[in-house]
Amino acid sequence: MKREILVVDDEETIRYLFLNLFSESLYDVHTAGNAPEALQILKNNAIQVIFLDLKLFGMNGIALCRQIRQTTPLAIIHAITGWAALFDIEECRGAGFDDYFVKPLDMDLIALTVQESFKKLDRWKRH
């Protein structure tokens, strides 16, 4: 069974990086360019590992994370941003993010983070 990841970023190149990184793996990557698309994907799929860009048009990543936490409290949600000066880590933690990555992304670190996220979810499921 493939594990599902959601990447929400208005930059097509970021979405492509994730699709390319995980194309031959045990993961299915869903992508969205904005919050409404992301919420629709989450409504139709049991996704537990999520990467959210903080600076989205319309609803930003902080507000989107808060909304996702209401319906999917055990999801592991990672912030990604190219605008670190606009969003501080404390605000992200308060919104419910589990981790924070600054662009340009280190895709080796992202791959490791995904593996660790699913290991954590597996541990939680056993309890």
Image (spheres, helix red, strand yellow):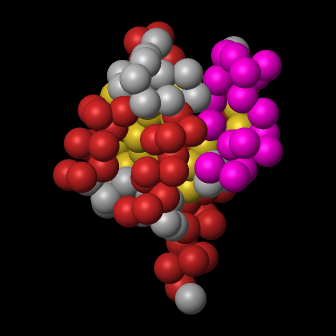
Q: Percent position (x, y) of residue 85? A: 79, 19
Residue at 57% across, 77% down: 124
Drawn side of residue 33 relative to residue 13, left or right: left
Give percent across and percent down for residue 48. 44, 57
Residue closest to the eye, 30 or 54: 54
Magenta segment: does it hold 86? Answer: yes
Q: Position of residue 121 (x, y in %)?
A: 55, 67
Q: Residue sitting at 50 percent across and 29 percent down?
A: 60
| Quarter assignment of residue 7 | top left
Of 45 and 85, which appears nearest the observer? 85
Q: Which residues are magenta?
A: 79-95
Q: Nearer the viewer, residue 25 or 116?
A: 116
Question: On the picture, is 109 further left or further right than 52?
Answer: right
Residue 93's place in the image compared with 60, above or below, is below
* Relative vertical location of residue 73 with respect to residue 93 in this rendering, above or below: below
Q: Is residue 87 left or right of residue 70?
A: right
Residue 90 falls in image quadrant? top right
Q: Is residue 103 visible?
A: no
In this view, the residue in front, 123 or 77, is: 77
Image quadrant containing the N terminus: bottom left
